[in-house]
Image (spheres, rainbow, N blue to C red):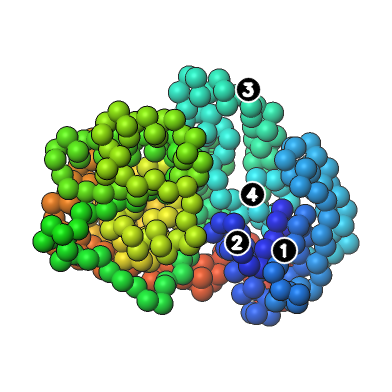
């Protein structure tokens, strides 16, 4: 049971995860009934053969908590006579049975902000937060989450026993042709070490921390370049004014959008994760799949999968985040011989995060996993 179900042209890795789980379940002999608000595919003949497919409701039903409850009441009436072994929903919704969760709770986001941010967030989201808290406390029988970071957050904020969770780390596609970092050019000085940042929401995802770290690199006269992908960057006064005021324009390339992620990952040597709101920043795993070195915020669940200094770097974001990030960036600039080995380790680790592993972990940890189960 999900809002939008796509068979292709995924907006994010979460949509792809749901598709892969459903596809593998059908191929594995499970009968799957799909209930969704929107079903999208680019071909005339959908690939997946559902036992039953119900498209019901509208987008507005998913934005307003009270309407979402009414929608789920309607779903409950539809499935009342069905004998499902598992009822699976995605995201924070009224509880049915099993939930796959991707994001931090609204309560966590509220508690994580400063006084001004808390006030603004409370005004905007207080109603949604109350509903979400009610749904979580009323209880899902099982929660699949992408990291221990999210498990601990929900468990602590809502007093939910940890046994109700299973950490389902994401998967990543490995490119067919991987071009490693050009270490020799970096060593010889013909190419600056290049850092990358993907920031859909620049301020919320720690973009300013990245800029301040770049400022420290410039102050230390390090040779570097940075590529920042930031939608609506032309109107981002914080970004533009900081670059101008600190003489960083010649070091930083700002891109509003990219045609494909491969162009971004192959243009950089290291990808920096500054967001403090990511239960698991998939960018880190994608960077590793392209044999790039991730530098990960310690608050990001992606930091759980690597060993610091082995497959990437983890910087302490709780205290002196800018200084700690800059230190990690200085290290990779000054030690290209280490970077080469770390990038190879990163790729080797990324190859273990397969869709097959995710599916097997999911099926084997459902409350009921008999072969003849209905799953949707």
Front tag of 4 and 3: 3
* Relative side of 221 to 97, left or right: left
State the residue at coordinates (27%, 43%). 250
* Residue 211 versus residue 4 in the image, above or below: above
State the residue at coordinates (46%, 69%). 173
Q: At which x and y percent is residue 316? A: 29, 40
State the residue at coordinates (59%, 57%). 11
- Residue furthest to the left: 188
* Relative side of 88 to 307, left or right: right
Determine whether label 4 and label 3 are within 8 Å by CB.
Answer: no
Closer to us: 338 or 153: 338
Q: Secondary structure at mark 4?
A: loop
Q: Earlier in the sequence, mark 1 or mark 3?
A: 1
Closer to us: 228 or 333: 228
Q: Earlier in the sequence, mark 4 or mark 2?
A: 2
Where residue 125 is drawn, which disc sits there? none
Q: Earlier in the sequence, mark 2 or mark 3?
A: 2
Where residue 91 is drawn, which disc sits there? 4
* Residue 1 versus residue 228 in the image, above or below: below
Front tag of 2 and 3: 2
Q: Earlier in the sequence, mark 4 or mark 1?
A: 1
* Relative side of 148 to 225, left or right: right
């Amino acid at each position: 049971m999900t809002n939008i179900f796509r068979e292709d042209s995924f907006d994010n890795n979460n949509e792809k995860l749901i598709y892969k789980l459903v596809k593998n379940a059908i191929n594995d002999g499970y009968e799957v009934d799909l209930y969704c608000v929107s079903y999208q595919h680019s071909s005339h003949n959908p690939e997946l053969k559902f036992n039953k497919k119900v498209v019901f409701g509208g987008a507005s039903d998913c934005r307003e908590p009270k309407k979402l409850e009414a929608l789920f009441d309607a779903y409950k009436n539809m499935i009342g006579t069905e004998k499902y072994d598992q009822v699976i929903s995605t995201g924070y919704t009224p509880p049915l049975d099993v939930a796959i969760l991707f994001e931090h709770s609204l309560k966590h986001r509220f508690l994580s902000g400063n006084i001004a941010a808390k006030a603004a967030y409370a005004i905007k989201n207080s109603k949604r937060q109350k509903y979400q808290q009610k749904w979580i406390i009323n209880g899902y029988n099982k929660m699949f989450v992408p990291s221990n970071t999210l498990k601990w957050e929900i468990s602590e904020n809502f007093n939910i026993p940890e046994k109700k969770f299973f950490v389902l780390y994401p998967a990543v596609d490995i490119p067919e042709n991987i071009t490693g970092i050009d270490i020799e050019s970096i060593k010889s000085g013909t190419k600056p070490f290049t850092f990358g940042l993907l920031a859909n929401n620049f301020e919320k995802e720690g973009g300013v921390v990245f800029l301040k770290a770049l400022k420290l690199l410039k102050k230390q006269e390090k040779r570097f370049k940075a590529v920042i992908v930031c939608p609506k960057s032309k109107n981002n006064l914080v970004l533009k004014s900081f670059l101008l005021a600190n003489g960083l324009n010649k070091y930083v390339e700002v891109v509003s959008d990219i045609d494909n992620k491969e162009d971004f990952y192959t243009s950089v040597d290291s990808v920096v994760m500054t967001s403090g709101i990511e239960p698991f920043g998939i960018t880190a795993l994608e960077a590793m799949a392209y044999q790039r070195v991730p530098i990960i915020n310690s608050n990001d669940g992606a930091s759980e999968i690597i060993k610091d200094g082995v497959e990437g770097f983890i910087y302490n974001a709780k205290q002196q985040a800018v200084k700690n990030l800059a230190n990690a960036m200085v290290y990779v600039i000054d030690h290209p011989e280490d970077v080469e080995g770390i990038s190879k380790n990163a790729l080797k680790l990324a190859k273990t995060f397969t869709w097959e592993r995710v599916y097997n972990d999911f099926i084997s940890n459902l409350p009921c996993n008999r072969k003849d189960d209905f799953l949707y």
